[in-house]
Amino acid sequence: MRITFVAFLLLCGLNYGQNKTDTSLYMKSDKITYLTDIGSESGDLYKTIGHHGPAVENEWMALRIYFSEKAAIDVYSKVNPGLELRKANWYPTAEQQKQGWGADYYKVANTVGLGGVKLWDGEKLIPLNPVTNRLARVGKTDTTSYMEMISKGVPYKGKKVDILVRVTVFSGKREATVEAVCLSKCKVQFVTGVNYFKDFKSDKGANYIAVWGMHPEDVAAENIEIGAAIKYNPKDYVKNIDDGTQYLLVSKPANRIETTIISACAKEKEINTFEKLVSYLK
């Protein structure tokens, strides 16, 4: 009886502490086998990897990094809390969306997306491309899931640098963290931020940028308003840029930066307006 009772307590503890995050990385030609890592000397597996790159999710959103010259971070928005990534493969059917599944409402276009990373050479943006190799990896811990992309041999100020971008989601938390690390023995100026479109609402606090609005029609069954925000330490940055499509932050020369990102949508029950998003950030 004692053993049975202890086993019961352990089982309850495991259920209570269940990791409500997940990862997804697979080839389009083989949806059955999930991978932990993949690489390409061309730096572009956009058309051959499922959902165009590695992905992670928490209960409120999924995120992916494009395995291409963009290396931007894109968002899958959820209407109801839960894990959908491995069932929907980022693109649920119109019928599934009517039943309350999320969808790809977010459009990155030619920007960093939400929290994506580029470099700054003192005058202009430097994409994480071309590369000598690009690697992607996904993994899980007891309470998190993460994806990493390493862009090797990126030309920067007359030399080549290796840049790691790691996105981590946490069980029970809406926020994700984005880390950018220069793996080479030098400091670089990182650029990150959040994109927006015409007629978007925006708010810039001391340590955050928030946007809210309708992304252009793309692959979702309907259009709804989407919110996105990035939180950062202002001491790490020396310049703000608004190029008409994205609000960008340029870092001081550094080996590493870290930001927090969050997204919400008008159809969810918790943060479904711009005002609620801003209130949450404050």
Image (spheres, grey):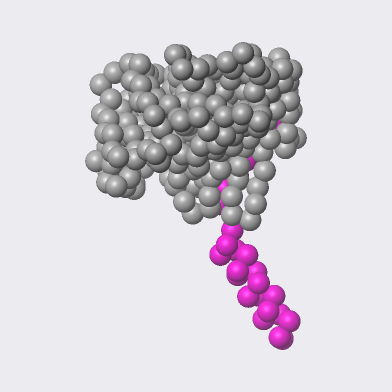
Magenta segment: 1-27
282 vs 264, left or right, is: left
Closer to us: 26 or 37:
37
For the point 60% across and 45% down, the residue is 145
Q: Residue at the bottom extreme? A: 1
In-front residue for pair 133/172:
133
Who is closer to the viewer here, 54 or 269? 54
Q: Can you give x and y, in whole percent of width and height, for residue 169 in the image?
A: 54, 45
Residue 273 visible: no
Report the residue at 49% width, 43% height from top: 176
Is 22 in the magenta? Answer: yes
State the count of labels.
Answer: 0
Residue 64 location (% of width, % of height): 55, 31
Image quadrant in which you'd find residue 243: top left
Q: Name the one closer to the observer, 261 or 29.
A: 261
- Horizontal relation, residue 54 to residue 244: left or right: right
